[in-house]
Image (cartoon, helix red, strand yellow):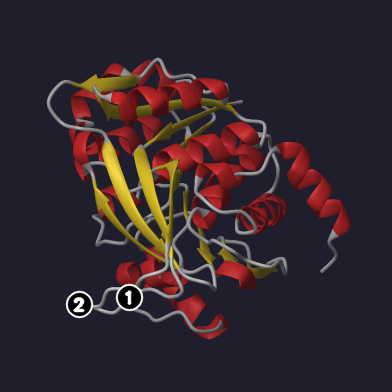
Amino acid sequence: MKIVVIGSSNADMIIQAPRIPRPGETILGGSFSTAAGGKGANQAVAAARAGGDVTFIARLGNDDLGRQSLEGYRSDHINVEHISRDKKAPSGVAMIVVDEMGENCITVASGANMNLSPELIDVARDVIESAGVLLLQLESPLDSVVKAAGIAKAAEVKVILNPAPGQALPDKLLSQVSLITPNETEAELLTGIAVTDSTSAALAFQVLHNRGVEAVIITLGKRGAFISTNEYTELVPGYEVNAVDTTAAGDVFNGALAVALANGQPLLKASKFANAAAALSVTKRGAQPSVPTLQEINRFMTTKMF
């Protein structure tokens, strides 16, 4: 079953530092590297490497960074037919600082990503309508995200929204979403409820269900994920690993989740698969360089027991 991912593509500029600097502080002794990134691109690559048939809809600058990104997507066997090039805006760039514990802070210059217009989404209408799963995030214009979700909803395509970076969202969008996957911070932004335990998670779930979302997964990093549908609420535990860089863990989770759901797996089983993929990703540095393959995920799952 086909997966369509709509979202951002960035070139990541990464500094490994002893710790994340405070405002006004300079820290010496870091090491520098570059990697392909962007939430949409990370999720598209994650889905493709997890075995998905993926089409990526995005907008790049007409520059070397954009060319390099396209080459990378093609090497992962991603359909790039609907990746357009912007003659004025540059490709997106993210500046990332990663500390010794693997935690990070990120600043993004969106560039051409913010020119992925509703009109360009409409050009890809047939591709969206023929998908099994549509995966969205929020590093693209909100109008375009709403447009894509509406097309998919009308065609009875399952819509997964990863509401990151966190922001307030209209009910019009949430009512078109089959599954929403915030982390704890994003869940609080959407519901006004700080998710600290199963009780507060249940309250946050109810707010989102009341706003029209069918299913909710609140990701908890290494602790796993809280899941809620109209039938059940359950915690799916995470996997214990030695984390070196958490930069793309949420994106890997969503990409792998989309593949498992497109393959007909029930939500709980799909979430375990996604947890395993995300856990593997934090054991390597970089965004897309850390994304595991289907073989790696399956091998990891056979060696781990809860």
Q: Element at badge 1? A: loop
Mark 1 → mark 2, Cα distance in angstroms: 8 Å
Left or right placement of residue 203 versus residue 285 in this view = left
Q: From this viewpoint, is residue 139 visible?
A: no
Circle 2 is placed at which residue position?
24
Q: Give the quarter of the figure containing the C terminus.
A: bottom right
Pick the quarter of the image with the N terminus: top right
Q: In this figure, which residue is indicated by the disc labeled 1?
A: 21
Q: Residue furthest left?
A: 88
Quadrant of the image occupied by residue 80: top left
The type of residue carrying mark 1 is Pro
Q: In the rendered image of this protein, does residue 229 appear above or below residue 25?
A: above
Determine the residue positioned at 62% across, 30% down.
52
Which residue is at a point 27% across and 55% down the rendered structure image?
171
Q: Residues within 10 Å of mark 2 (few under 14, many from 20)?
A: few
Q: Position of residue 126 (x, y in %)?
A: 39, 16
Q: Is residue 18 above or below residue 287?
A: below
| Viewer-side residue, 35 vs 201 | 35
Provide the secondary structure element on which disc 2 rests. loop
Q: Bin the neighbour count of mark 1 within 10 Å (Cα to Cα): few under 14, some 14-19, many 20 and up.
A: few
Tell me what residue is drawn at x 44 percent, y 34 percent. Answer: 5
